[in-house]
Image (cartoon, helix red, strand yellow):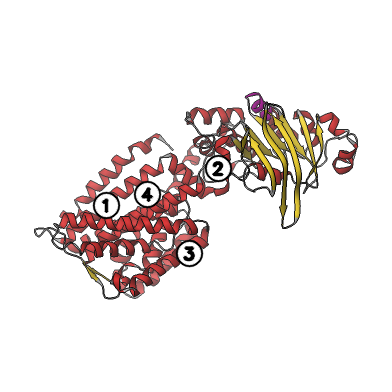
Amino acid sequence: MSAASILRLEGVSKSFRGLRAIAEVSFAIEAGSITSIIGPNGAGKSTLFNLVTGYLAPTAGEISFKDRRITGMATNRIAELGVARAFQIARPFRDLTVFENVRIGALFGKAGVRDVEVTVRRSLQLAAIAHLAEQPANTLTVGQLRHLEVARAIATRADLLLADEPCAGLNPTETAAMIDVLRLIRDSGVTVVLVEHDMPSVMEVSDRVLVLDAGALIADGPPHLVASNPQVIAAYLGTPDPSPLPGHSP
Amino acid sequence: MNTSSARLPLLILGGALLLALGPLVLPPFYVRVGQLMLYSAGLGVAWAILGGFAGYGSFGHAAFIGVGAFTAGLVENQFPTLAPALLLLLGLAAGAGACAVISALVAYPILRLRGTFFAIAMLGVCHVCAEVNNNVDFFQGSMGINFAPIAPASMDPAVFFYWLYLAASTIVLLIAWAIWRSRFGAGLLSIREDEDTARMLGVPTERYKRQAFVISAVLTGLLGVIYAHALGYITTDSVYRDDTNLSLIVFSLLGGMGTLFGPVIGAFLLVFVTQVILGRLLDFHLFATGLLLVLLVLMAPGGVIGLVRGWRLRRRSEMVPAE
């Protein structure tokens, strides 16, 4: 295991009443990278995020973050260590403004003193929604809400950002903007792990791709290698040349 | 959170000073109404620290009025020779202590419940406390308990208790303000908005909820102790009251749920309307109050503060042409 790995899973399994959602998954995430986790619906991607953030405790195996065992630790404790998550279905604090939403992240999150105001401004900037600061969260579009999710998550000063389908349902322009934001976040020193369905986005942004199928890891490597892996094609992609998925209208 | 919130304590103290003049100019009936308004406002704010800020609306906070009042009475009566001021302080300390212990014990299991389930479980807690208080002879709930008079002989007790309620409720409001603008307050707010997300952002939700619950219970208990002294004699039925349980929710609904001043506005309004305007209608007044509430919840779910905010927003958007 390389010394630069920030997140490590070893033999992690999760069963729900006998149904195995995650089966002995092991991998390590390198600090400062963008990793995408792909796989068909029900492959266990979201369960994996729930395990890492402590929403669920694994049935077996160990999870460690920055060489510290976090298996079964409370969600807010894991957040204090520096793990943040952006939800697929945005969960803003609806009665608050964008600024106030991000402020909650800046006030809490990773433990330690900080300048809240500065952290909020920088996070809004990084997520490209500084101009929306005073808007009530319930007036935002779906795309803007995704950016808010990301801004609030990085305001916690997390070292690891777990983003759950940040591009789902976005039009091509919005998708491109989100990819830019994710790159900027990576460049600012935050390790990013994505769950994503949108293959062109995955291919473009990822340093590495992990493929889950039926709870098991079936492929792991750079995007172009994974995309041409016959097992992956059979399980997920269906065509050797992943062309843009239809159905996105601006 | 805007910068003007730092000046709020001055506003609160100024308002309290103004209200302190009330008994000097008001006829006796209105001094009594004023007492009830101030007591209700204090209770409403104490309730809102948990119910409004954190969104855990309790339907059984009268439990702490009862526990506070009876503990104070039982303890005070062990020291019949103590000076009135010391007696009150002793009662307040004992009542607060009992409320702190009971709320801290109840907090662990009950705060796992959310929404309606929490509210109803609190109603259960209130009724259990009342039953124990009533049926265990030691607590003297059914035969009642006397409180020594604490108002100075030279002063009208009604005026004395008006000022006592005013002082207590002002302190409760200042504490609520301090919580409101703190990191703790922001954490409670995030719990109300979305508890799971709050936890994911690192908010220690379980600890914060317990702390808010204990603070809310203790402040409610303190007001209960003063209430018992104002009555002079209490039984279980005079403190563990379901109409109080209901009113505490209504104050926030009426004034503005989750706001700092909402419960104050709501308490003033409801007490004034029921005591002064509807007081003469006797039996009809409960019906009228109920009708008022239904209309309010339907037409102004944000309460008075919500109405004012909406009105101000509309004004602003009229002045600035829409893009």
Tell me the residue that label 1 is attached to: B168
The residue drawn where x is 21% and y is 57% is B88
Residue toward you, A66 or B5 = A66
Q: Secondary structure at mark 2?
A: helix
Which numbered disc covers residue B121? 3
Which numbered disc covers residue A76? 2
Name the N-terminal-most of marks 1 and 3: 3
Instruction: Judge depth for marks 2 and 3 and give the one in front.
Output: 2
Q: Relative to A122, does residue B36 appear above or below in the rendering?
A: below
Instruction: Judge depth for marks 2 and 4 and give the one in front.
Output: 2
Chain at numbered mark 4: B
Q: Seen in the image, is A246 located left or right of residue B108?
A: right
**For the residues marked 2 and 3, what is the alpha-carbon distance in whole angstroms?**
26 Å
Q: Seen in the image, is B263 located left or right of residue B20?
A: right
Q: Secondary structure at mark 4?
A: loop
Classify the position of the C terminus of chain B by image quarter: top right
Can the viewer see residue B93 in this picture? yes
Q: Is residue B250 magenta?
A: no
Tell me the residue that label 4 is attached to: B261
Q: Secondary structure at mark 1?
A: helix
User: Do circles 1 and 4 both sit on a common chain?
Assistant: yes
**For the residues marked 4 and 3, what is the alpha-carbon distance in whole angstroms?**
27 Å
For mark 3, does the 10 Å Cα neighbourhood hold few (<14), some (14 to 19), or many (20 or more) residues? some
